[in-house]
Structure formats: C-alpha cells, structure tokens
Image (cartoon, rainbow, N blue to C red):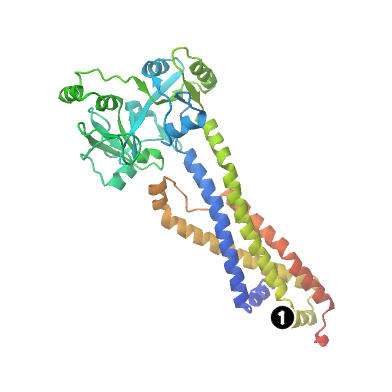
Amino acid sequence: MLFTIAKDSLLSRKKTVFLTFCSLVISLLVLLSVEHIRLQAKESFNRTISSTDLIVGGPSGQLNLLLYSVFRIGTPTANIKYESFQALKEKRLVKWTIPISLGDSHKGFRVLGTNSDYFEHFRYGKKKPLALSQGKQLETLFDTVIGADVAKTLGYQVGDQIVITHGIGKVGFTNHDKSPFIIAGILERTGTPVDKTVHVSLEAIEAIHLTPAKLQKVIADPNSVDLTPKSVTAVLVGLKNKFATFKIQRDISQDPNDRMMAILPGVAMTELWSLLGSVENILRVIAALVLLSSLFGLSTMLLASMNERQAEIAIFRVLGAGPVKIMFLIFVEAILLALSAIIFSVMLITAILYGFEDFLASEYGLFISSNILSLDVVKLLGIVLVATIVTALFPAIEAYKSALHRQLSKR
C-alpha cells in the first residue's frame, strides 16, 4: 500500500523528482566506477605474475626491481653476473629459474631476452601458462615471439621481419638493422605486460651487440662465436619448498661473488599499493562527497515538497493514516528513488564497461570485468541506502509534525 502511494506521489512531481534522480545517478556513477575500477585495477596488477617465489636482480630497491622486471616500467640500474644466475639455478632448493635481459625496444615496445624456461614456467593470473595463438617458440637465433598487443598495434603476422633498437624509447639510439628478427610466434592475450613485449633469446641479445665483423660471422654460422651472456637484468625464481624462501633470499643478499637482492613479489606488490593508497582514498572521498551532496539534494527536495503536500497529508489523516505512517511514506519515497537510481546506475556502468572492455584490455592492459556486483560494491550500496534513510529523516520528521497537527478543516 505505502509503496503504491509513494510511487504515485513521486510521479505526481515528475520534474523535481527527475532532476533529483539524475543527480543521484551521476553521483552513484562516480562512486561505483571509482570503487569498481580501483578493485579491478588492483586485481589486474596482482594477476600479472603468479607462482614466482622470488625476483632476483641488482641492488636497486624493492619497488624498482618489481617495476622493471614484471611491469617493464623504469630502467634497471644494475645487472647480475651470468655466473651468479647459473649458481642460483643449481641451488638444491630452486625448482626453476627464468632469466630476463632488458635494455632494447621495438617501436616503443620492450624487448625481453630470455630462454625456453620462460615459456615453460612463467605463470600469470590463477597460475595460467603462456600459450601461442600462432606460430612456434624461439628455435633459431634470430627468432622472436611477440605479445598480442604488439601484433595488433603494429599489424604483424608470423614470418614478418622486425628490427630491434638499442634503448627503451620509441626513438632509440641505434637500430640493429644488420640482424633483423623473424616473428616465429604470437602469444595469446594475457592482460599483462607480456602482451606488450617482444621476446628474443639471450644469445640473440648478445649477438646484436657484437662488432659488425663478429656479427657477420654469427649470421653465417651461429656457432662460430661464443654467445654466452655476460650478465642478465633479473631472474624469476620458483622454489621447491616455500618455507625455504627466506633462507634463499638471505643467501642471495649475502653472496660474496656478486651484489644481488631478492624480493618477494607479493610483499613488493603490497608496498606498491600502499604508496598508491593515498590516491585511492582521495578519489573515494571525492566520490563520497559527490554522493553526499546528491543525498542532501534529495532531502531538500522532500522538505521543499512539504508545503505543496499539506492537503495530501490532511486527506491521509482523514482516511485514518497516523503520523507514523505518513512519516514512513517519506522514507519509502526516498528509498524508492535511491533504489531506482542504484539499479539504473549499475545497468549503465555495466553497459559502458562491456562496451569498453576490449579497449581497456588492448590499450592499458586492464581487464575490467563488466560485472560490478562484487562483495565490496554490494556493501557500498548498502551504505548508500543507509545514508539515504538518514538524510530522509529530516523531511520525515517534518511530515510527522505536519500530520500530527494538520486537520482538513484548517485549510
């Protein structure tokens, strides 16, 4: 009964109710978008690497090592000796290792030197392995396997030739055009920096930096020159026993033959998000203030309508409605308007995210789900409804007072 009356009452004031509804929808769009994208972005970053117990590199700081080895952001300040990598690989508690060599690029995309262990042991998301959508893995010296975004952005196919540039910018210092690479394979999309990476062998990285004379010898006969790397940028490490993590980490940091550091990816990721936490909180506060202003607008609209509804309240009193019931009518109107705005906002955000899902994945490497009804968002919507009831308290009390004293004969 109250629901029907509240609905008809809102429809009788279409213009003011519509403006209030639009205000609520806009504020909810801001609030829900900030919260959902914040959660999804964090999940997207966390899914970048999994099953890796340690990341080993030069002593450049925990965050810096994480950023350049996993996210391809920044520049390495120090490498580690190749002998140190080999010694690490032979440790009894080490299950697998993935060497990484950075420093070159191709048209703005990072080039990563590695070996076959990368394709065998690298995991992302929920321990998903890398898979090829086309072609094959690295087989010959100047083969390359490119990420999905590299292929899509530059329009490459298996068999195309590419030239690697020394340096990490779109315009590098030196083009290694004497030794072009042939695209052997294209990886399936992962939603991680792998999609924006050009993968080559460690030996190929050494070859392209040889003198022209030696390079020509290598091109003629790859076995004519020793292409064992002198150093690598970082090493991803998987352990046989997780309980040995801190022991291996301590052993690496105390290695007398090389200056190295080992970090736990999860710990480094937590530190990264703690640094970004202030930015997250600022966005959430701004969104909350926008919503609060809209709720106050709802309260103001209901209060302003009291003068217009004196006859309506008087009729309700004659029909036997008590002051408490009339007060609850105001609450129902506020909740009905807020629920309508919530449902419309959720549907609109879902449609927008669904339409831009591929764009966000390809351009920014963010896999943002179009399903926004996570536990955190549902809790947030519950808080919105509670806040609606609180802000509707003032007009509801005013309606109660008016109903308590109003008589039809006083008009």
Residue at figure coordinates x 49%, y 57% from the top left: 350
Left or right of 184 in this view: 278: right
Q: Work out whether 104 lies above or below 30.
A: above
Q: Considering depth in this image, is 289 or 350 the residue closer to the camera?
A: 289
Q: Farthest residue toward the right? A: 405
Q: Farthest residue toward the front? A: 173
Crowding around mark 1 (Cα neighbors within 10 Å: few <14, some 14 to 19, many 20+) is few
Q: Considering depth in this image, is 294 or 230 the residue closer to the camera?
A: 230
Residue type beneath disc 1: Glu
Snapshot quadrant of residue 68: top left
Q: Which residue is mark 1?
A: 308
Does residue 141 appear in this view? yes
Does residue 373 appear in this view? no
Residue at figure coordinates x 35%, y 39% from the top left: 169
Residue at figure coordinates x 75%, y 83% from the top left: 311
Q: Element at badge 1? A: helix
Q: Work out whether 391 lies above or below 84.
A: below
Residue 319 screen position, x and y as percent: 77, 81
Snapshot quadrant of residue 344: bottom right
Quadrant location of the C terminus in the rendered image: bottom right
Left or right of 60 in this view: 303: right
Q: Work out whether 337 lies above or below 356.
A: below
Residue 70 screen position, x and y as percent: 43, 34
Left or right of 241 in this view: 177: left
